Amino acid sequence: MEKVKIIKERLKIAQSCQKSYSNIHRRDLEFKEDDWVVGDPSAIVQIEAIEFNEELSYEEIPVAILDRQVQKLRNKEIASVKELWRNQQVEEATWEDEEEMRKKYPYLFE
């Protein structure tokens, strides 16, 4: 029982410390009607109409190649391209296999 009391006391001390640390960074916020509080308005992206198929899915279409890299393995090299997709921002670009992208979307490499 003595050890349980010691553990409870140490937990209370730890909680108290954490509470004091978090309260230092907290501040009361007040908002008025018509205040902009949902983020940066420049980050809003206009979304085009998306056409869904019967399975309620759609195909993303790449619009640009942002970067290219080649990974060297023991016996071969793998080329990848960083693709910017329609209705997405630059931060959401993905690395894709260059050979597959050349087959599917040859207009990007012209």
Image: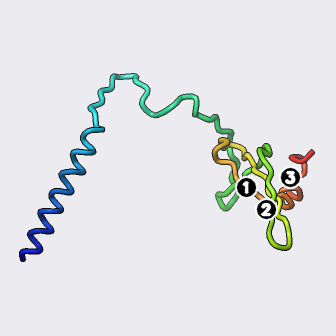
How many numbered markers are drawn?
3
The three-letter code of the residue at mark 1 reads: Trp
Q: Give the CA distance from mark 1 to mark 2.
A: 12 Å
Nearest-to-viewer mark from 3 and 2: 2
Instruction: Using the image as rendered, state which of residue 66 and residue 15 is in the foreground.
Output: 15
Element type at mark 1: strand
Q: Is residue 61 above or below residue 43?
A: below
Element type at mark 2: strand
Crowding near pointer 2: few (<14 within 10 Å), some, many (20+)? few
Q: Quadrant of residue 20?
A: top left
- Report the residue marked by disc 3: 105
- Report the residue marked by disc 1: 95
User: From the viewer's perspective, is 106 left or right of 89?
Assistant: right
Quadrant occupied by the C terminus: top right
Instruction: Using the image as rendered, state which of residue 81 and residue 42 is in the foreground.
Output: 81
Quadrant occupied by the N terminus: bottom left
Numbered circle sitting on residue 36: none
The residue sitting at 79% across, 43% down in the picture is 64
- Report the residue marked by disc 2: 71
Crowding near pointer 1: few (<14 within 10 Å), some, many (20+)? some
The three-letter code of the residue at mark 2 reads: Gln
Q: Is residue 33 above or below residue 108?
A: above
The three-letter code of the residue at mark 3 reads: Tyr
Image coordinates for residue 17, horizontal then vertical, percent: 21, 51
User: From the viewer's perspective, is 101 left or right of 51?
Assistant: right
